[in-house]
Amino acid sequence: MLNSSRRLRRLAVPVLLSLVAASCGSDGADQADTSADSPSVTADVSATEATDGPDTTEAPESAESEAADESAVDQVNDAAYPVTIEHRFGSTVIPERPERIVTLNVQWTDAVLAMGETPAAYMLTSTVGETDPYPWQTGLLDGVERIDSAGQIPFEMVSALDPDLILVTFAVAEEADFDLLSDIAPTLAFLSDLEVEPWADQVAALGEALGEPERAAEVIAGVDAQVAELAAELPGLAGKTYTFANLVPGDTIYVIADPDDGASRVFNALGMELDPEIVAIDEGAVGRVQISYEQIGLLQADLVGVLLNGAEPDSIVGLSELPSAESGALIDFTLPDIVGLNTPTPLSVPYLLDLMRPQLELVAGDA
């Protein structure tokens, strides 16, 4: 995702933390806020809830009792369908609880995994550097069929998987692509017009699709609690500044300049603020600013994250002289880290909080 090609730069250049998925968009929504920008979900309830009486089944009838209990659960779940979920391209009707879900980007894959489900298949896109599952997915996708894409959706392969729900965002560049997927199975794309989808919105929508909105709420609350706990443990982060930059060899330095960018949410939730000196440079076009390598000294924030694209830190003049480098609060991110920050998920956020904790502690003055 980070090389000299214009396409890769659009996905990666957005500045490290805002790079793989949206490159130039801001979403303006808190990652945990599912009220203002949440998808509109409606459910038609036509079945009658089953109620269980006292448990008087004796041992010889245990199998029959278990079958009855499962039937009762099925009736309750069936009562939630069909579900209609609105999204960027209109609305999608899900007639029954999906069992074979195919995910075509990392955010949706993580939403499925966080809900305790296993996708029937998931897609990785080599043109944006996806060659293996992400580190926060370790062990969760073992044995799951993998779709390798060079940028285009392999529609025939998706169809052969016989999905009953398809989840996709960036891979659908045109509504025509969405229509092709919808001809295969009910499909959810971007839930709004935001460039970086709030992960909590995706989890909430998936909870409705699965007939488990309470479980979705638990997932969202659990991640929010981890962020809040870290903020409480490191109160010194409040008011401290951060900056993230993508250093593209032979090109320039791309710096995030949008406080509402998808990559900014977790830091905002920790009480930090995007370096106002960088924000002031932004002309408001895409939420990113370009600076030359000679201007690297502008990266004066308390916490600085960089994506070096394979370059050695010592080869970049001025990098070691940044205040963050001298204090130990300079983070040399890998591409997977950037994806997790740029397109946050309920799995990547906790992973990255652990990864960045040493530098966050230094910035908070607690190390």
Image (cartoon, rainbow, N blue to C red):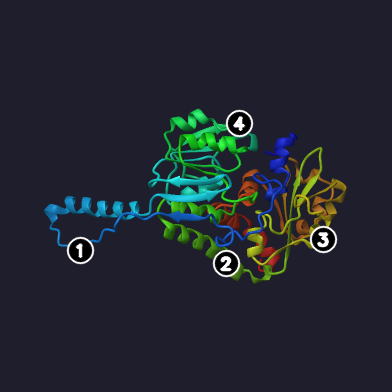
Tag on residue 53? 1
Which element carries disc 3, helix, strand or loop? helix
Q: Which of the two discs, 1 and 4, labels the residue nearer the N terminus?
A: 1
Circle 2 packing at 10 Å, graded few (<14), some (14-19), many (20+), is some
Tag 3–tag 2 contact (CB < 8 Å):
no
Which element carries disc 2, helix, strand or loop? helix
**What's the CA distance linking mark 3 and mark 2?**
27 Å
Residue named by callout 2: 228
Tag 1–tag 4 contact (CB < 8 Å):
no
Residue named by callout 3: 277
Residue 119 picture quarter: top left
**What's the CA distance linking mark 1 and mark 3?**
66 Å
Tag 2–tag 1 contact (CB < 8 Å):
no
Amino acid at dot 4 = Ala
Left-right relation of 19 to 137: right
**What's the CA distance linking mark 4 and mark 2?**
38 Å
Circle 3 packing at 10 Å, graded few (<14), some (14-19), many (20+), is some
